[in-house]
Amino acid sequence: MKMILAILFLLSTALLSAQESDTTLNRWTAKGVASLTVSQIAFSDWVQGGENALTYSLIGNFILNYKAEKWAFNNSMKLTYGQTKLGDNGFRINDNELYLDNVYVRKFGWAVDPYISNIVRTGLAPGYIYDEDAARQITEFFDPGYISQSIGFTYDRLDYIKTRIGIGFQETFASRYTNFTDDPETDEIEDFRFETGIESVTGFDVSFMENMLYKANLRLFTRFAKLDVWDVRWDNVVTAQVNKYIVVNITWLLIHETSQSLRTQLKQALQIGVTYNLF
């Protein structure tokens, strides 16, 4: 009798675990989070100097994934738009990006899995360089735009880190603003550039303490023609969840792309705001 009960218990446990594991298979899972962050300083009859300042950022993070027994299709999109107003000047854009990442992974039970991916990058709105007297437009939506594909192997056995590396293909295209597509060594103005090389993307997502989260995304790309030169995009966010809706964000973004600038670009912000789970 004890043996029968033990067998029944083991069978029921196995069936329950199978049912639990199957709940994530063969279905779409979606997540969307929107946030508005603000930083502000104001003066009134202040004799020690200073100017009023207001900065806001709108951020949207969306995930749509499908998981099957032998394959997975993962999609993520980040939208950011922000402006700053300093003193009597008008609002100036300080954040402006669409970043879309699509990855198809085939599961063979190996230590690493083969994948194909696609990344789309562009500004959401017109971008400007602000001189002392005027603003000069240098970009607009998909002008320029960046699309890259890669095929290789990925490792995603751990919950907090996912990394992939493969052969990469990158297309840069423009219409009016050809600063990043034109080859200065030729006489004509090119509005399209195609490059092949090696691409690596690593995502890091870890919770620490009770209400804090660190997320990072590191993309590296080098061209076969110049293997000693790497494009780097390292996006970092530390989020402290004060309560259900209030968050504090520390963000910093490092970009090194010699086609844009010979110097490393760095953007950092400390902001407080509200967040809302759309779905």
Image (cartoon, grey):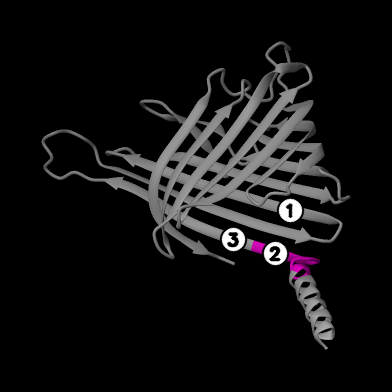
The residue tagged 2 is 29
Instruction: Decide which of 12, 65 is in the foreground and name it.
Output: 12
Q: Quadrant of residue 71?
A: bottom right
Mark 3 or mark 2, whichever is nearer to me: 2
Q: Quadrant of residue 17?
A: bottom right
Residue 222 percent coordinates (x, y): 72, 24
Task: Report the residue at 21% width, 35% height from top.
Answer: 50
| Local SS, label 2 | strand
The image shows residue 182, relative to residue 62, as above or below, that is above
96 sits to left or right of 111 = left
Task: Judge whether residue 244 is colored magenta.
Answer: no
The residue tagged 1 is 74
| Local SS, label 3 | strand
Mark found first going from the N terminus, 1 or 3: 3
Kind of residue indicated by mark 3: Gly
Q: Quadrant of the C terminus?
A: bottom right
The residue tagged 3 is 32
